[in-house]
Amino acid sequence: MERINLRYWNKGEIKRLLPEKFVEREIGDELLQTMESGKVLTLHGPRQSGKTSLIGWAIHRLLERGIAPQNINYAAMDYLDIHPLISDTRKLLILLREESDEKGRIYLFIDEVQRLENAGLLLKQICDARMNLQIVASGSSIIGIKEKIKEHLTGRKIDLILYPFSFLEFLTARRGLPEKKIRRYKIDETQELIELYRERLSSHWEEYIRIGGYPEVVVSSKRKNWLYSGLFSTYLEKDVGGLLSTANYQKFQDFVRLIASEVGKIYNRQAVARILGRDARTIEKFEDILNVTFVSYKLSPFYTNIRKELSKSPRFYFVDTGLRNFISGEPEDVQITGLLLENGVISEMLKFAYNKDFLLHWWRSKGGAEVDLVLKKKKGVIPLEIKGIREQKPKLTRSFISFIEKYKPEQAYFVTGGYYGNTNHKNTKIYYLPSYLTGLLKEF
C-alpha cells in the first residue's frame, strides 16, 4: 500500500501529481461532482489528452477540501509491480479499509486501466463490496477494453471523455485574453468581446487550428512536428500495434493518411478499399479503430428516417486538427480555409456537445443541397453553415435557406470569417457568427 496510499507519500511526490503548467480543464467541475456519485467513474480520451494530469488536479482538490491523505489512493498501471495488489481485490479492499481513517469516503484512482488484465471484472468486484468507496479509472479507449469494462459495469459506471484542449482552454494556456474574459458567453453577450479583441481572437483561433490542442504541444516550446511525431508513433505502437496483423499495420497508416487528406469529404468505403487493396471489412475495422481511440469522428447524415441515416455515407473529421495537419503533411503556415476550417469548427462542437442533449450530423437533400453541420436536439434541429467568408454580411447560401424552409428551426448559425450580426428568415433567427466564437459560446 505504500506505493498507492498518499499517507506514505512525501510532499514532493504529491506535488508531482500536478504538472507545473497545468491548465484547468472545463470538465474539471463535472469530474468532481461525478466523483460523489458512488458509481465507477471512467475517464476516457485520446492518448496524451491530459487524463493523468486531470487526476492529479482532482487529488489536489480533495486534499484542499480536507480529505485525509490516507483516504486517497493512486495506482498507475504503468508500473507492473502494482498489478498484483489491484488484481487481488479481496486483499485490496481489506487494506483500503484498514489504511483509511474509517470516517469518510475512500478514493481509489486507477490510471491507465487498460493495462490491467480483466479490468472490468476487477472493477465490478471492488464496486460490489458496498464500501464507501469512489473509484476513478482512466485510460485510452482501446478497442475491446471499453467493451469489457462496459460488460461488467452496466448500471454501475459513468463515462467522461477528456479531449485535447478546447479553444477556451487554448486561450487559457496561451493567456490570449485578460483572465476574466476567458469564459463562455451567451451569444448576446459577445458584442463587446468582438469589438475589443477581434484581431487577437482571430489570430489565436488560426494558430489553434494549425497546431491543435494536445496539452504538451500547446504549452511546450519544443518543435511541434517533433512532438506530433512522437505522439503518433506512440499511438501506432501502443494503441494500434496489437490490434492488427503486420501487413495491415502498414495499410492502417496509409488509411490514416488518406483520411487526413480527404477530411470532410463524403466517404466511400468501397472506394477506399480499392485504393488500399483491402476488403471492405478490413477498412471498417480501420474506421472503428480511429473512432474508438478518439483520433477521428464520423459525422453521419441527418435524416428523419433512421434507416436512411444509418445507410448513407458519412464524413470523417479529426478530433484534433493539429494531429490531422501533421499526418497530412500540411505546412506550418497552412491557410485556415475550406475543409480545414470546417474541421476546426466541428471539432469544437464535438467537444462542446458530447455531454449535452444533442447529436452532430450533416445534411444533404436529394437535390444536392448541403448544410455542413446539424445539431439534432430532442425538440428540434439547429443548422450551422461554415463558410469563413470575410466580407461584410455574406449572402446566405441557397442550401442553408432550403434546410431552414424544410425543417423550420427556431435559430440557425451562418459561420463566417469575421462578420457578426443577425437576421431573420421567416420565423428563424439567423446569427452570423465569426468562426472563433463557436469555441466560446455557452449554448446553441
Image: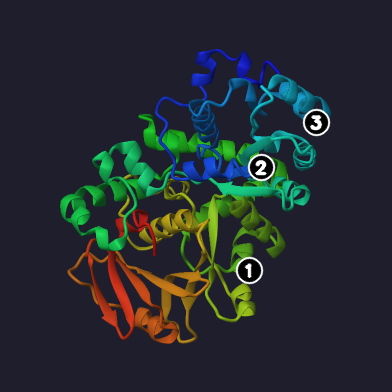
Q: Mark 2 points at which residue?
A: 38
At label 2, the amino acid type is Gly
Q: Is residue 169 visible?
A: yes
For this rendering, which residue is in front, 363 or 305? 305
Res 89 label: 3
- Badge 2, how many Cα within 10 Å: few under 14, some, many 20+? some
The structure residue drawn at horizontal position 22% and vertical position 65%, both measured from the top left corner, is: 420
At label 1, the amino acid type is Gln
Residue 239 position in % (x across, y down): 64, 41
Q: Name the residue under label 1.
A: 270
State how far apart marks 3 and 1 are (Cα). 47 Å
State how far apart marks 3 and 2 are (Cα). 18 Å
The structure residue drawn at horizontal position 77% and vertical position 28%, both measured from the top left corner, is: 93
Residue 87 position in % (x across, y down): 79, 30
Asked if 102 appears above or below 258 in the picture, the reply is above
Residue 287 position in % (x across, y down): 62, 57
- Badge 3, how many Cα within 10 Å: few under 14, some, many 20+? some
Asked if 221 appears above or below 282 in the picture, the reply is above
At label 3, the amino acid type is Thr
